[in-house]
Image: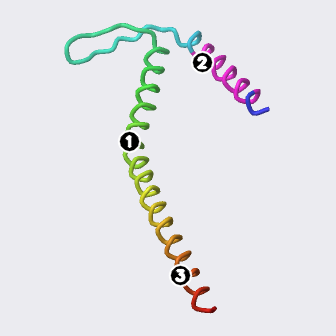
Amino acid sequence: MARVLYLTFAILVALAGLGFHVLNDQPVELNYFVGALEVQLSWVVVAVLVAGVLLGVLAMSASLLRARGEVKRLSRRNEQVEREVASLRAATLKDAH
């Protein structure tokens, strides 16, 4: 069911993008440091969106890596505490007999 929803959403996004491209096919001139380039407005918007997504992923990667390291550290600490609790329980049971 989820696959159908994802596929439907992807098709709707593709159709919206196609409609945007058809309605915004005017040429625009991009001036940059070493020259100029004439491209369609829709391609400029798509390029800026892709660049924004890539920059967002890059910005998130540092915090994601930090969080993964913290999860590993806490997981190791949890295992250590569980072993310690198990040994204390075993020692308490031996003392009780």
Question: Dot 3 lies on which element?
Answer: helix
Label of residue 17 in the image: 2
Secondary structure beneath label 2: helix
Q: Is residue 46 left or right of residue 92?
A: left
Q: Secondary structure at mark 1?
A: helix
**Residue 63 covered by magenta stretch:** no
Q: Does residue 49 appear left or right of residue 14 in this picture?
A: left
Mark 1 vs mark 3, foreground winner is 3
Seen from the viewer's position, the closer of residues 29 and 94 is 94
x and y, in percent, of residue 28 in the image: 40, 11
* Direction from residue 75 to residue 32 in the image, left or right: left
The magenta region covers: 4-20
State the separation of the CA atoms marked 2 and 1.
Answer: 26 Å
In magenta segment, residue 17: yes
Label 3 neighbourhood size at 10 Å, few (<14), some (14-19), many (20+)? few
Q: Position of residue 1 (x, y in %)?
A: 80, 32
**At 44% across and 51% down in the image, what residue appears?**
68
**Label 2 vs 3, first from the N-terminus:** 2
Is residue 71 shown left or right of residue 15?
Answer: left
Mark 1 or mark 3: whose residue is earlier in sequence = 1
State which mark lies toward you, 2 or 1: 1
Crowding at dot 1, Cα within 10 Å, few <14 / some 14-19 / many 20+, comes out as: few
> Which of the 4 image quarters holds residue 72?
bottom left
Badge 1 is on which residue? 59
Residue to which mark 3 is pinned: 88
- Label located before the other in sequence (2 or 1): 2
- Determine the image quadrant of residue 96: bottom right
Task: Measure how far apart labels 1 and 3 are at the Cα level.
Answer: 45 Å
